[in-house]
Image (tube, grey):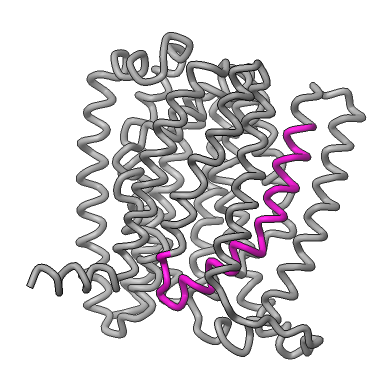
Amino acid sequence: MLRSLIERLKSSPSYWQTLANYTERVWGFAYSLILARIILPEIFGVFVFGMSIAQLASILTRWEIGNLVRSDRYYQNEGFDVVWALSKLLAYVEVAVIAVVAAIFAIKGVQNEVWIAILVCGIANAMDKLPLLLKCDLEGRSQFRQNLKVKLIFPPVVACITIPMAMMGWGLWALLSSAWVGVAVNWWVFRKANKREIATRKPSVQLFQKVVRPGLWQWINYICYITLHRADKVMVGSVETRQSVGYYNRSYNYAPLSFMGLGAIAGATAIIAFRDLKDPQAKWKVFFMRAGLLVGAGIVNGIIWLLWAEELVVLLFGENWVGSIPYFKAFAFFGAVQGIYFLSGSIMQGCKQYKAQALITLASILVAGACFMYIPVSGMNVAVILQCTMVLAAMGMILFLSRQQR
């Protein structure tokens, strides 16, 4: 009986994705603790600021059509060759755009480290587009084992490269090199796991149209995603010091420890689950079970940070990060916010409601933008309004689906 239970777990997408997520979270947390004691907050701030600029600059070429492959079987079959060709073209264009943006920052005399970070991070993100498309293809076929393999290979490789560099004083280059290590590992693992032959035939206009139309809404969804997850760092960096950006980003990443532990149930496996469930009541049952777990854990997470942020920050990250304590308190309940936001997005993706998801999230962002017309931009204000925007978007998506499925 125990053996059969283990076999059923191994055949479940959630099993492998959960293991992959926990491996990534545990490693990422330990790795961050090490680097936090070697690299100064200002260096982290420069890296995050440059990476955020690079991702904002790539908005025009980030159609995120890999989500189509994951959520729609058509794009896993006859439409995949077209998706691959379009992704390849967009990757080349993205490299050119990043080069131009980095050149503009260099010509304007911006700090050298910033435009270097933009260039290196931007090109790495562009080169990662195709292996991640192969990953989405595998996930759409409910194959998640290779995700764990990536998380097992990446940590020792990147540690052997970046930690010695950081100890020699090359902190920024240590952070930048980790992006390229990730690209190399992704290419090797996902291409090896995905045995499919990719046709070199010239795609037809009709097939391109079948990709571009839904891809347009996925592109708008990506714009919203980047705005919510990168524009905030740029806003903080534009009015405060690079050190403050480092403080802000560390709390943004590590305050939601509950979501770090449970995020697997709100991501790719949730999209597959909602896609395959045909009964609306079954979908809502799965949704509320997962939402209850994510929000409940997030509330406990928030209480812990509010009560013991001072002790935990010093214990985990060291004295250099004392300045991040107010941000950790501001992001105390971010785990619950992220949980409901990403789970709501996953059910929209699983139900193929790309357009509605894009419009609802975009409207929420516009409301947030209107708030900044009356509220001064500061790190604390950005943190609060960001979380309110994500909750508003999640509530809008839940309300939309509840009306659609009456």
Residue 16 place in picture, x, y as percent: 34, 62
For this orientation, the residue located farthest to the left is 1
- The magenta segment is 116-145
Q: Quick one: 45 or 1, which is closer to the camera?
A: 1
**Quarter containing the N terminus:** bottom left
For the point 31% across and 64% down, the residue is: 14
Rendered position, 5 above or below 72: above
Residue 293 place in picture, x, y as percent: 21, 52
Q: Residue 27 is drawn in which quadrant? A: top left
Residue 46 place in picture, x, y as percent: 66, 25
Q: Please name the predominant secondary structure of the magenta segment in the image.
A: helix
Q: Quick one: 261 or 11, which is closer to the camera?
A: 11
Q: Is residue 275 magenta?
A: no
243 relative to 266 in the view: left or right: right
49 relative to 381 in the view: left or right: right
Q: Is residue 135 magenta?
A: yes
Rendered position, 255 above or below 83: above
Is there any visible trace of residue 135 in the rendered image? yes
For the point 79% across and 68% down, the residue is: 89
251 relative to 65 in the view: left or right: left
